[in-house]
Image (tube, helix red, strand yellow):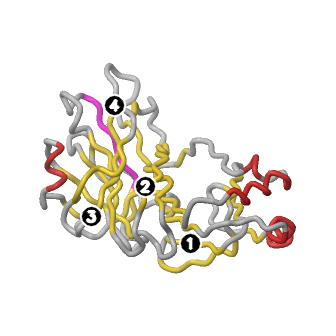
Amino acid sequence: MTIGVEAAFRGRKTSPGVITFDSGLRMWSEGHSDMINFRVVFASALLAGAHVWAGAVIDLRDNLTCCGVGTFPGFPTWGETFTAPNGTSFLTEFGILAYINNPNVNGTQQFYAYVMAWDGTEATGSVLYKSALTTMVETDTMTEYDYFTNVAVTPGSQYVAFVSADELSPNNNDRTTDFAFHDPPVYNGGTLVIQKAGPFSNVLQPNWTVGTDNENMGFLAEFDGGTPEPSTFVLLGTGLAGAAWMRRRRTYSKR
């Protein structure tokens, strides 16, 4: 079981798939959505003057409908739109769930991950985040790929986090990748979106295919409400800071 600790506390669900946090401490076990209140444990740090900040999580990784919403890179661009929650200033991380449909054959499956603003029909403006080249793990087990983004966001505005092979040449090969999804949808602040053809400049055109039933991808997005002040580091004295973020790659069964 992987345990994560973050400067946030008193989780409350504000909309489907979204949990927001007041200042304090959050701890969770991966694979479960239960929030454990550590108010007493954290009280000494708060009384010592530690500054903590609000955050939110959009977590669509569990209870998936299945896999294989389609193949990639046959359709070279896949993503999830989302709405930045109230009280947040930064998208700190996003993750997607995918697996190679034909592992252990010649060639590799590669893509880049991106974040851009979204206007309801297309990506807009400049690329806010682009990852290093991702080479997929040779497995037919659903696997999480995480990207640490630190992108400034505006609460209530929509964005799209997506992966694409359009900037690779050639962008098609003999490998196929399936993405996890939810149908019916479980999050009403965004939806699955697909680009059926390149080039990459097409992401700025209104030719995205939006999930016909408003499906959601298997997806994670984490947000912070601001940059911690130096006084936050009083947490080091509590022995909790070393556990600030621990994550191992999660695997998911395909149903």
Q: Which SS class for mark 3?
A: strand
Kindly identify which residue carries mark 1: 19
In depth, the one of 1 and 224 nearer the eye is 224
Q: Give the alpha-carbon distance from disc 1 to disc 2, as whole Å.
A: 19 Å
Q: Residues within 10 Å of mark 2 (few under 14, many from 20)?
A: some
The first of marks 1 and 2 along the sequence is 1
Kindly identify which residue carries mark 4: 109
Q: Nearer the viewer, mark 4 or mark 1?
A: 1
Q: Which SS class for mark 4?
A: loop
- Give the image location of residue 66, x and y in percent: 41, 56
Q: Give the alpha-carbon distance from disc 1 to disc 3, as whole Å.
A: 22 Å
Kindly identify which residue carries mark 3: 118
Q: Nearer the viewer, mark 1 or mark 2?
A: 2
Side of 224 where 244 appears, left or right: right
Assess whether mark 2 and mark 1 are in contact (beta carbons under 8 angstroms).
no
Q: Residue at x 48, y 40 (%)?
A: 141
The first of marks 1 and 3 along the sequence is 1
Q: Residue at x 14, y 45 (%)?
A: 197
